[in-house]
Every structure is written in C-alpha cells, then in structure tokens.
C-alpha cells in the first residue's frame, strides 16, 4: 500500500506540475494577473477552482465521520451550505463580479476597504484573515500529514510534501496555475469518491445487505435512528450559521467571484459548481452511512472504536478497499487539502500585498509588490506548516472556529455592496467596531467552553455563539442601513 | 425579484425546521427516508431559485 500510494502520489504531482507549468502561457504582468488571472478565466475552470477551493479534506474525512456517527443530520448541515451558496452566487455574486472588474479589485479586503472608503478597514480585515486562516491552512497540512503517517511514510514528510506542492503550484503562475491544478484536483476528488462509493455498495452486496436491511440497520443503530435528526439544536445552528455565509466571508472564495471572464463564464461557474457540490455532498454523506450500516452488522467492536474517533472512519474503511482504489482515494483527499490550502494562501497573500503594502507605501512599486507577494506566500506557509509539524493542540478545532471568526464580514460585505454608490460618512468606524465585537464574542465563547465546543455550546439564551456574533456584528451596522443623510459618493 | 429573494430566504430557513423533534419524527414516520428527501428537495429548490435570480441579475445569459 505504501509503495502504491507513493507511485500514485508521484503521478498526481507530476501531472499537476505539468498542468501548472503549461498555464504560465496565460500569465500577464502585475498583481491583477497573478492573483485574479486578469479577470479572464473561463467558466469550467472558474467552477472547478471554486469547488476544489471550497471542498477540502473535511469532506471525505470529517463529513464521512460525521454522517457515520450522527446520521442524516450531516446531510442537512452540508446541504444548507450548498443551498445558501448558490443563492448568494446568484444574487450578490454578480454584483461582486461586476464591481471587481470595474474598480480593479484584487483582494477581498481591498473590496471592503474601498466600499467603506478607508484603508484601515482593509488592514483590519487582512489581519482577521491572517489570524483565522493560518489555522485553517495548518489543518489541511495536518490532514496530509496524517495520511502519510497512517501509511507509514512519516507525518512530517506529509506536511513537507503538501507545502512544496502548494508553493510550487502558486509560484509558477499564480491564479492560473492554482485554478488549472484545482480543476485537475477537483476531477480527481470527485472521481475517486465515486469509485469508493461504488466499492462500498459492492461491500454491502457481498455481505448480503440489501436496501431494507440497510435502512433497518441505520434506523436501529446503537446511536439511535440515524435517519432522523440526532444533533442538538445548538450543534446544528453553531456549525451551519458560519457555513451559510461562507461564500461572502472567506477570501479564497470571494476572490473567485472576480475571475470569470464574462457573464457566460460566471453563469457556467455557478451551474457547474452547483452540480459538483450536490453530487459530492450526497456521495460523502452516504458513504459514511453505508459504512456505518456495514460495520454495525459485522463488528460491534469496530463500530465502538470508530464512534469514539470519527476521523478514523475513512482510513479504516479504505483499509478494506482494494489497494489501487485506496491509494487513489488517499491521493484524492491529499488533493482536496492542497487545492483548498493553496487558494487560501494565494488569497491571503493578495490581502497582504494590496492592503498591508500597496495601500500603505508612499510609492508602491511593482517589483517590490512581487517580492512582498512571494515573501507572504512563504511566510504564510511557514506559519501553517510550523503549526502543523509542531502538532499544536486544537489545530482542527481552531480551523472550525475560524469560520465563526470571519462571520462579522457577512453583514459588512452585504451592506457595503448595498450602499456601494453612496456610503454613510465614518462608516469605516462601524465596520471596525462590528469586527471587534464579533471577535470578542467568539473569544468569550472560547474562554467559557474551550476551543472544541465554542461554536456548539449554548452561550446566551441557549443559543450558540455564531448566532450572537452574527446578530451583534449586524446590529452595529444598522445605522449604515437606515442612514438617509448626506453620504460620501463612491 | 424581491419575491424570488424572499422565497430564497424562506427556503434556507426551512432547512432548520428539522431541529423540531416533532417535525423530524413526522418526516421519518411518513417514510424512513423522509428527512433525507426533505433536505435534498429543499436543496434542489434552492438551486433552481438561485439560477432564476442569477438569470435576472445577468440579463438572461445562457
């Protein structure tokens, strides 16, 4: 298995690197080309990079584990993200797409900075990105490290491999190499997960588990009826609320709204992403439930062991799969982690360049911008890989919490776009206050419940912290919404 | 357009209805896959509405 994984991984890296290298032909000069492809990306590539950026190693590991332990509630959790994202991409997304090319936006923090008429908004938002997304990136590297470790290749080598792939596929041609390799990785992710599902169904058939037996096993499991809602309301609300606004708060996906080359490409991006997301979600959730039924009918000991650590479900499941399939699936999970991480690093680097250098320097130069870009990419990866290698406690929990840390950007982004032609004076003060209060609530929740339960435990009036973060950060912005007095023209 | 956006907000809110134990159990009593189908159908409806809104925003581009 180890040798097979190395061979398949090497093939994956070589093909990806060839694709990245060939994409150099599209790269022009300047940060607009490097970070957003000069707003010239086609519909299919836009869709695939959006999908591969969004769907990380969490899908085939975390979501499979969640559905194994908690049943169909995991489907509702993941589908509400897809539903709200498609609606956001259909309604607010076109406004972002249009304004980005009209105003020359490169980073999402720059977008907010311009909408609110203050470079300080961009600085604060860029810093929020750094604090929230370095743990998220570290969690992706940790995922690859865990795969390497479970196969006997060494955890640290996994982190190192992922970091090298990320750096190389960014540096070669910026957004062009990231997006084209994302398309390759996205197809690998979907293809390998479909293959694993087909095998899992054959596993049921070989154990004479028909559809009725499957339903009975899930309905009468040791965790209760897995086909009904088994989560607490706080858990469902706490985990879904940040995801509902993911398309507006996470810079790596906001930036992807800038890139489609024309209206047709934008529409294609949304359609293909919706199709990809729907299929991939159904597959990952059903995989967890299929395997739960299989394990519950064959080995109670294994079932108990996996219920205690749901992240072991996928690795354990793949141990029973034919080695070529398992190797391909493991590389698919590796691809999911790399495609998410390199988009995050590129996007956060764009914020560092645009909002922490170009907006602050008295005479920014393209040469120094380029150096700052490269330095930012290496620095971000060094921080993330350092955190992953040191196996800092709670990296995965911190990455989940990071989604709530970005939540104040939801009302800020929506209001900023709504008021984009005439913004209230001093609106930037409300924006910064909104971010501060949102982060304060999150820190309070972490202080009371700890990192792992900060999002899902009741904070006040039995409601979890994401609800209060959203309410408080929106309430502070209300004066901007209702303002009818003299406004600054944008 | 406002009606369509309002529909979209209502549909996303409906995703949270199964938090009610009564609703969740009722769906499962109708059919063992009732809750599963409920969320799948809501998602497909949301996608259709999202595409409709997109069509209006992008001026009928195919």
Image (tube, coloured by chain):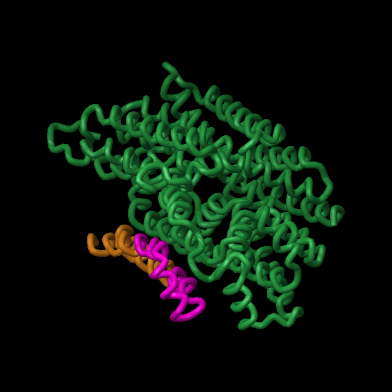
Who is closer to the viewer here, A200 or B20?
B20
Above or below, A362 relative to A426: above
**Magenta segment range?**
B12-40
Foreground residue, A305 or A368? A305
Chain appearing in green on the rendered image: A
Tell me which secondary structure the magenta stretch mostly adopts: helix
Q: Quadrant of residue A323?
A: bottom right
Q: Quadrant of the N terminus of chain A?
A: bottom right
Point out residue A39 in the picture as x, y percentages from the top left corner: 45, 46
Q: Nearer the viewer, residue A357 or B3?
A: B3
Indicate left or right for A149 with A474 as reference.
right
Numbered label tally: 0
* Residue A124, x across and y down, in percent: 41, 28
> Is A176 contained in the magenta span?
no
Q: Position of residue A477 (x, y in %)?
A: 27, 37
Tell me the orange chain: B
Task: Report if residue B36 is visible in the image.
Answer: yes
Question: Which of the 4 image quadrants contains residue A328?
Answer: bottom right
Magenta highlight on residue B23: yes
Q: Is residue B21 left or right of residue A153?
A: left
Nearer-the-camera pick, A280 or A139? A139
């Amino acid at each position: 298995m180890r040798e097979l994984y190395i061979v398949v991984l090497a093939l994956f890296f070589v093909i990806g690197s060839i694709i990245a290298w060939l994409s150099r032909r599209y790269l022009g000069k300047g940060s607009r080309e490097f970070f957003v492809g000069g707003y010239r990306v086609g519909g299919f590539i836009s869709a695939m990079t959006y999908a591969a950026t969004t769907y990380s190693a969490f899908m085939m590991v975390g979501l499979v584990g969640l559905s194994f332990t908690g049943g169909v509630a995991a489907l509702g959790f993941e589908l509400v993200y897809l539903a709200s994202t498609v609606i956001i991409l259909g309604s607010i997304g076109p406004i972002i797409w249009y304004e980005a090319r009209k105003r020359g936006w490169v980073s999402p923090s720059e977008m907010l900075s311009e909408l609110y008429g203050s470079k300080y908004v961009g600085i604060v938002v860029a810093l929020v990105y750094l604090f929230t997304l370095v743990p998220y990136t570290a969690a992706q590297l940790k995922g690859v490290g865990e795969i390497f470790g479970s196969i006997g290749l060494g955890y640290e080598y996994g982190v190192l491999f992922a970091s090298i792939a990320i750096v190389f596929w960014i540096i070669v041609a910026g957004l062009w190499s990231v997006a084209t390799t994302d398309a390759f990785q996205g197809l690998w992710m979907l293809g390998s997960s479909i293959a694993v599902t087909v095998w899992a169904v054959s596993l049921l058939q070989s154990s004479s588990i028909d559809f009725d037996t499957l339903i009975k096993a899930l309905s009468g499991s040791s965790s209760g009826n897995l086909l009904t809602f088994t989560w607490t309301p706080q858990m469902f609300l706490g985990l879904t609320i940040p995801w509902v606004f993911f398309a507006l708060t996470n810079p790596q996906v906001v930036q992807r709204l800038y890139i489609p080359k024309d209206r047709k490409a934008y529409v294609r991006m949304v359609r293909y992403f919706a199709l990809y997301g729907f299929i991939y979600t159904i597959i990952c959730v059903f995989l967890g439930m299929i395997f739960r039924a299989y394990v519950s009918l064959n080995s109670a000991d294994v079932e108990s062991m996996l219920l205690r650590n749901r992240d072991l479900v996928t690795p354990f499941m793949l141990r029973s799969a034919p080695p070529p399939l398992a190797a391909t699936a493991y590389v698919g999970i590796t691809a999911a982690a790399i495609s998410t991480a390199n988009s995050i690093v590129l996007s956060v680097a764009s914020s560092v360049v645009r909002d922490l250098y170009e907006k602050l320097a008295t005479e920014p130069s393209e040469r120094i911008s380029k150096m700052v870009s490269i330095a930012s990419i290496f620095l971000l990866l060094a921080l993330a890989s350092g955190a992953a290698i040191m196996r800092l406690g709670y990296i995965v929990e911190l990455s989940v919490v990071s989604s709530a840390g970005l939540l104040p950007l939801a009302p800020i982004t929506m209001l900023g776009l709504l008021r984009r032609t005439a913004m209230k004076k001093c609106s930037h003060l409300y924006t910064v206050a909104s971010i501060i209060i949102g982060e304060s609530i999150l820190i309070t929740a972490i202080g009371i419940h700890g990192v792992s339960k900060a999002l899902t435990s009741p904070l006040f009036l039995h409601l979890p912290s994401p609800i209060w973060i959203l309410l408080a950060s929106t309430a502070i912005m209300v004066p901007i919404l209702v303002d009818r007095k003299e406004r600054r023209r944008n | 357009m406002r009606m369509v956006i309002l529909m979209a907000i209502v549909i996303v809110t409906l995703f949270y209805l199964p938090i009610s134990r009564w609703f969740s159990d009722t769906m499962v009593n109708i059919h063992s896959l009732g809750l599963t189908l409920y969320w799948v159908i809501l998602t497909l409806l949301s996608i259709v509405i999202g595409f409709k809104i997109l069509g209006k925003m992008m001026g009928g581009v195919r």
